[in-house]
Amino acid sequence: MLDRPCAVRTIPKESVVCVCNATYCDEIKREIPKEDFYVIYTSSQSGLRFHKSYGKWKNSASHYPTLEIDPTIKYQTIEGFGGSVTDAASITWRSLSEKSQRKLIKAYFSKNGLEYNMVRTPIGASDFSTHAYAYNDFPENDTLLTNFTLTPEDIMYKIPMIKAIMKTSLTPVHIMAATWSPPKWMKTRYTYGGINRLKKSYYQTYADYHLKFLQRYKEAGVPIWALTTTNEPINGVFNLIGFNCLGWDINDMGEWIVNNFGPTIRNSEFKDIKIIGADDQRFTVPYWIDMMQYTHPKALEYIDGIGVHFYTDEIIPASVFVPVSRQYPDKFIISTEACEGSQHRQRHRVLLGSWHRANSYITDIIEDLNYNLTGWIDWNLCLDPRGGPNWANNFADAAIIVNKTNDEFIKQPMFYAMGHFSKFIPRGSRRIKIVGNESTSKLPLNHVAFVTPRETIVIVLHNE
């Protein structure tokens, strides 16, 4: 099968976008290079998108900029790359015709798309919903969760999108789930957002809340690979946001994990599910795991990995990830959420054709991978032209923007930034040593290298 080129739409003062509809969408076939040869896939601000070129290895004089790889020195194993099925993403996806819906799923998850193999989804609502809600909102004070039923958002939007993804992908899709907020009646303040905590009288109920979710999604044909211990818990401690959140301090969360959440999951039919702690900003990671070790070391026996978000990543990663990886080598670290356009300093929520935002993704992913992260999950898989729907008006950008009026979707430069990792670094790949010579160090180059289960070597190279 031949590659299909980008249907280019030029955005003034920005890079290009690629336009897809019910009848056409660009595709890229990954090739295994012949021995002594290589294949280069290039995307550029000037408009190249996975442009393919070929060459044969040859010895070069040492004064040329050179990258030296050593496949015998291996680091972390990659879990995968992907994006999130929120209410907003799935509602937006459903606004397209059936043929365009299939094209969008294939663009991300098919053999000739980005070959994503991970999905993150909220348990109940997030801000990227049309309204604030949780499961079992009523009856209140229902400790047995007798009314825990899936919502129209699950039945009509999220589950159909996830099942379409599972049907399209050639590899198992690992689905991660996280709660933004439980029902208001479980909380110390009767609110979805703002400062709030979980009432201790509902610690077991909140653990059962997660178990009920796993059971309902299994019944719907959607297996969950991992749960996190609550999305961005610092938000409800410091009143950082006005939308769905639940505040935790380390001592209370440790108590809940040890006495309720951990035993509930591990003693259930879902005992092998991954449990991911923190699920918050980069700067919280050392504090979360070190203080958990200090206050409730038994909690870490239930924790498989640590989730980290993108929004404060100007913090030097060496000070965060190196000590955590050294002290807790049995805990993987994975990036669980990222988006551009949501910060107050960013004037445009959606900025079509932005190469700057693609650069932001590329540099962050390379940096994370070089500090032992095992994967990187984008936020909404698609959004509308405003960057929603979002009930809290917390609009953001996405790698795909959907224009339902024209029954088309637009692939942003961020889409291709993600693809340079997800398409070429499959699950099970191992990061390997790569170093540059003196000439290379003078250039604005970022890089990371892997040996794959296909017995190929992949280098992702970013020229700033």
Image (cartoon, rainbow, N blue to C red):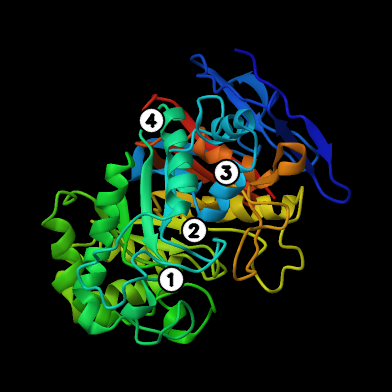
- Locate residue 33, reporting x and y percent: 52, 18
- Locate residue 22, reporting x and y percent: 68, 27
Asked whether 292 or 136 is in front, the reply is 136
Instruction: Say few, some or many: other residues with alpha carbon within 10 Å of mark 3 (under 14 / 14 to 19 / 20 or more).
Output: many
Asked whether 120 or 316 is in front, the reply is 120
**Considering only order in the chain, which callout, 1 or 4, is on the residue closer to the N terminus?**
4
Q: Which residue is mark 2?
A: 337
Image mark for residue 232: 1
Give the alpha-carbon distance from disc 3 to disc 4, as whole Å: 18 Å
> Which one is in front in this view, the residue at disc 3 or the one at disc 2?
2
Q: From where the camera sits, is residue 389 visible?
A: yes
Whether 250 is drawn above or below 106: the answer is below
Whether 269 is drawn above or below 313: the answer is above
Q: Secondary structure at mark 4?
A: loop
**Considering only order in the chain, which callout, 2 or 1, is on the residue closer to the N terminus?**
1
Q: From where the camera sits, is residue 369 visible?
A: no
Q: Which residue is mark 4?
A: 171
> Which one is in front in this view, the residue at disc 3 or the one at disc 4?
4
Instruction: Classify residue 76 as left or right of residue 87.
Output: left
Q: Secondary structure at mark 1?
A: loop
Q: Which residue is mark 3?
A: 418
Residue located farthest toward the front when viewing the structure as drawn: 139
- CB within 8 Å, label 3 to label 2: no
